Amino acid sequence: MNTRVRFAPSPTGPLHIGGVRTALFSYLYARKNKGVFLLRIEDTDQNRYVEGSEQYIQRALEWAGLTPDEGPSNGGNFGPYRQSERKEIYKNHIEKLIQNGTAYYAFDNADALNESRKKAEEKGDTFKYGAQNRMSFDNSLTVSKAELEQKMKEDHVVRLKVEPGQKISVYDEIRGNITLESSLLDDKILMKSDGMPTYHFANVVDDKLMEISCVIRGEEWLPSLPIHQLIYDAFGWEAPQFMHLPLILKPSGKGKLSKRDGDKEGFPVFPLSWDEKSLGFKESGFLSLGFINYLALLGWNSGTEQEIFSLDELQAEFDTSGIQKGGARFDFEKAKWLNHQHISNTSAEELYTYPVVKEQLSELDPKIHLELIDLLKKRLFTLNDLKKEIEWVISPVPYDEKVVNKLSPKNPAAVLEGVSSIIKNGSNLENLKEQLMGWAKEKEIGIGIMMQCLRLALVGKLSGPDLFDICKILGKTVTLKRIAYTISFFNQKT
Ligand code: GLU
């Protein structure tokens, strides 16, 4: 059987990272098995439809590098790929179930159902429309043939006829066998009164017609699996394989990660920004590879020590036996660390193609842009960190007061006079390090102190990249100017 895997989001708003992880695992599974990864838009619930979300989903998948092989925008042999465009298909299929007696029409209006619900609750029961009470309701099992024709003109739904006393056995590739007593289920609605299928019905029909070989989705859909199995059985179809991915948990490990956690703790939960209030990973300075690499590790491990993967490596290494059962705790620091690794491994030329990088460098001479990126990329956790890292290029002042106080008793002006004359007399900055070291040794000046004085003069604080790279980027004239300024600064202080 060919491997065909689908990602089936509902366009009800932006994709949460859990959705992107489902897409990623589906994509990797398809690629690993030389199969097809398709996108299906599950838009049958008109009430939850949010304008713009389908486009958002497409853009997010594209940014993440998970472009579907088939889908609403690029087509395929199994379309349409939007459920709202498949109404005829569902209508034909629901009739098959009515005919074989596994589904029935139900005419009860909301008032009648509420009445029954109230009665059940008064007795302390949960209301369930099913085997134990379906014969007392208004449906095609209880009305006469003559009445039926008339009733069909009124609003009605179609329900699945769940036979009581059966053991429903389903198998999940990650969790193993799950058995459920059919009497626990109600007669689920398959077709709504607006003529639209419910999620359960459309999902099963489409997975079958689109020849999906393995359904990969989040754990929150596990309770739907027995219902889906019953629908497959009702058609006499063989069900595909199932894999339910572990939940993504809050950083504390307690409970499911939500948008509110991101807002509260200041990290993104969407791949791309959805509105001005919520930045996505992209706008927070993530490379798509950093983001994808992190998502891959949320609930999966390769069984080796390796943590940094390219998309090609993930495709080669991905194995469903590495998917864990338990929830995966979200850890933004780890996400940033992985992003940092990927930024460090990307060439300055490529990083320079990102508008956000160019923008941050815009105040500086374009001649030094690439050199600067090359010098600083290993210090970036997100692309947005660049601005802070280049502050010294513009100006080292105001100096960090703590450093000034620490160096003041060490005669910094004299140390810097010496440094300055060595730089002045040297023909270039290439072997400056050796020259300064030799000089400090001869004059019995601590190398640490000398370096700190020079760093304060050039950067204004004790952090930053390699000092001699800094001298090269600034050039001899600026380096000397900054040292002269620091000398007069200390002289005025005393
Ligand atoms: N439309 C469902 C969702 O929004 C898909 C669940 C499934 O993959 O079966 O997540």
Image: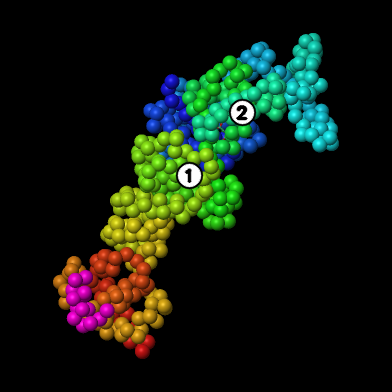
Q: Secondary structure at mark 2?
A: strand
Q: Taking the image as drawn, is residue 201 in sight?
A: no
Q: Secondary structure at mark 1?
A: loop
| Above/below status of 385 relative to 182 | below
The residue under label 1 is 298
Kind of residue sitting beneath label 2: Thr
**The quarter of the displayed image where residue 429 is located:** bottom left
Q: Residue at x 57, y 41 (%)?
A: 13
Q: Magenta span covers which residues?
A: 433-446
Circle nearer the N terminus (1, 2) = 2
Residue 252 is inside the magenta segment: no
Instruction: Name the residue tied to disc 2.
Output: 179
Which residue occupies 51% across, 26% down?
A: 241
For the N terminus, the image quarter is top left
Q: Visible in this render: residue 336?
A: yes
| Image coords of residue 48 (percent x, y) | 63, 37
Query: Residue 231, percent across and down?
Result: 61, 22
- On the rendered image, what quadrant is the C terminus found in? bottom left
Along the viewing direction, whichever of 124 and 396 lies nearer the viewer: 124
Q: Residue at x 51, y 45 (%)?
A: 328
